[in-house]
Image: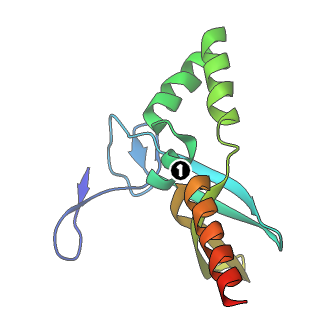
Amino acid sequence: KEVPGFDKPRLCNKKVENGQCAAGHICPEPAARFNMLLQVADAFATVHCRAFGAEAEVLADVPAAEVAVLEDERMAGNMQAEKTYTRIFRNMFRRWTLTLKCRKENYEGRVRLQVSVERCVPVDFVAEGLQMAHEVRRALCMV
């Protein structure tokens, strides 16, 4: 459903339950979207963050609409859907290069840090290896 915006009407992006969003807009066919809670770690720290929408689809490597259909079939007891669902989420454990966005927000009177994924791409091990080899060669030539 289109809602009035500042310059022009825009699509409502609120969560839809029972055919309408919290603002009361009617949506007979809502679009499925991912809302993933992730634990991201490197050598120094671990942080919890959220991936939503397009970034989450890149991480899952499958459209949210397909997962929604699979989830419905899985809940109905379809064993093939269960296997496919498990395979999809097992595939997510890979190395990624992430750009994170942090912002402070007040929640129940307490300030907390909200971290979300802005951009994500799989780690390109070949390109990283070539870059490291180039740096080693450059360091050896300078010695």
The image quadrant where one finds the C terminus is bottom right
Q: Residue at x 66, y 18 (%)?
A: 82
Percent coordinates x, y for residue 56 in the rendering = 53, 50
Query: Could you say which is closer to the camera, residue 64 or residue 104?
Result: 64
Percent coordinates x, y for residue 108 in the rendering = 72, 76
User: Could you tell me which secondary element the residue under label 1 belongs to?
Assistant: helix
Image height of 70 relative to 49, above or below: above
27 vs 135, left or right, is left
Query: Could you say which is closer to the camera, residue 116 or residue 120?
Result: 120
Query: Could you say which is closer to the camera, residue 89 or residue 93?
Result: 93
Disc tally is 1
Residue located beneath label 1 in the image: 56
Residue 114 image-quadrant placement: bottom right
Percent coordinates x, y for residue 19 in the rendering = 40, 38
Residue 84 image-quadrant placement: top right
Image height of 99 relative to 110, above or below: above
Q: Residue at x 67, y 17 (%)?
A: 83
